[in-house]
Image (cartoon, rainbow, N blue to C red):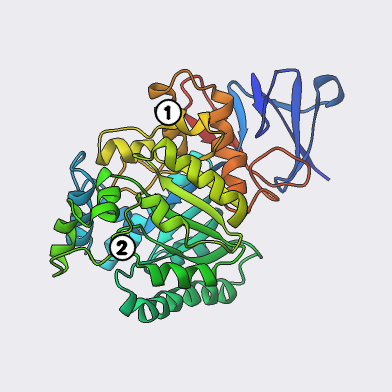
Amino acid sequence: MNQRKFQADRIFTGYEFLDRSHVLIMDDGGMVLDIVPEELAGEDIIQLKGLLSPGLINTHCHLELSHMKNVIPPQTGLIDFLLGVVEKRDFPMETILECISQGEKEMYEDGIVAVGDIGNTTNTISTKCNSEILWNNFIEVLSMTDANAEKNIQQYSAILNTFDEASTNASLPSGKFISSLVPHAPYTVSAKTLDMINELTANKVVSMHNQENPAENELHISGHGPFLKLYNRFGMQESPFPISGKSSLRTWLQHFNKKQTIISVHNTFISEDDIAFAQEYATENVSGLFFCMCINANLYIENTVPPIEMLLKRGMSLTLGTDSYSSNWQLSISAEIRSIRKHFPQIPLQLILQWATINGAKALHRDHEVGSFESGKKPGVVLFDEQLQSKRIC
């Protein structure tokens, strides 16, 4: 059996840093064999300058919107951003598919090995079938009224079935695709629709956009606010949702109780009380709760950053995501790491790298195969330079 041996200034295992006296040993298929002291590693060690890390995990992306790069200007605010996505996303299919391919290439070269990818079309299937990245395909359901819940679930279930059939027809390795239905956001999914998704996702991963704008809370507490502008675009003069009198998160999270793993995405305007509620609710009703940070998308849309320190204070598990080209300048987890370091310099790099590796793997139910340098895994290898620019090694 051929071996590949890597030595660098530091090795991040997925959990902790090891100094230069350690050597990472892998087989020629990319499987981790061991990390050993230098004196036990033998010869033919590949010397690298920088920080070695397991491959990166992107727990929130919209690859199918890659054709919208630079289409919507930054800092419009969420409601105008959403209107822009609705009104400007139609491009020739040839352009859409080419941009999807380029987006996948950028993520691969950044060192991303697994993606939680949101989509409500089948446009990404061809690229994904030919990709070396692992894909959690989150088929995103939009259904604003209870009356249309069953029809819309059937529509998106058909897209889900197409992903499953494509995986079978392409003879993809087991686990290359993991596909499931997920709700889009608290302002686009009715209570009945949430309940139906709950029944269909027992023990699966559920991703949900959450509290990207203060108007989300206002919508559920009073039925008023800026989201009415969005609903007017669809011919509705008032909110399609009943007034819950509670925050956005408290309104939607209570619909999930089938031991799902929940990824709450963005959380830009979450409160400490809501974090405490989510923590308590999750203990009894779901098997895992992760908060995905997409800091560059938050800066792009709202010119603000998520309350990371508040989430850490409550002991929450964090992951990282890129969102889409419609709301970001790049699809790069290393860029997300650099941005967090810029805005939160007090947070240790080791912790941020955990979010980008093992936490993301756990959130996507892939920690048995990626996320850390542990024997038997094929996590990929990324090399960071001093500026935390990343490069895929294998």
Instruction: Residue at 41% x, 58% y: name it.
Output: 252
- Which of the 4 image quadrants contains residue 44? top right
Question: Residue 305: horizontal and vertical position, in percent?
Answer: 34, 32
Q: Is residue 366 above or below residue 19?
A: below
Amino acid type for the residue under numbered disc 1: Ile
Q: Residues within 10 Å of mark 1 (few under 14, many from 20)?
A: many
Q: Is residue 210 left or right of residue 37?
A: left
In three-dimensional space, the C-alpha distance between marks 2 and 1, rounded to whole angstroms, equals 29 Å
Frontmost residue, 325 versus 311:
311
Q: Is residue 151 left or right of residue 70?
A: right
Amino acid type for the residue under numbered disc 2: Thr
Q: Is residue 189 above or below residue 323?
A: below
Location of the N terminus by quadrant is top right
Provide the residue designation for mark 1: 340
Q: Is residue 23 left or right of residue 269?
A: right
Mark 1: which secondary structure? helix
Frontmost residue, 140 versus 11:
140
Instruction: Residue at 56% x, 34% y: name it.
Output: 315
Question: Residue 302: horizontal and vertical position, in percent?
Answer: 25, 38
Question: Which numbered tag is attached to residue 188?
Answer: 2
Question: Residue 32: horizontal and vertical position, in percent?
Answer: 75, 41
Mark 2: which secondary structure? loop
Frontmost residue, 207 versus 340:
207
Q: Is label 2 in contact with label 1 (beta carbons under 8 Å)?
A: no
Q: Can residue 326 be seen here?
A: no
Instruction: Residue at 29% x, 45% y: name it.
Output: 327
Q: Is residue 327 left or right of residue 1?
A: left
Q: Residues within 10 Å of mark 2 (few under 14, many from 20)?
A: some
Q: Can residue 236 be seen here?
A: yes
The residue mark sitting in front, 2 or 1, is: 2
Question: Residue 367: horizontal and vertical position, in percent?
Answer: 66, 48
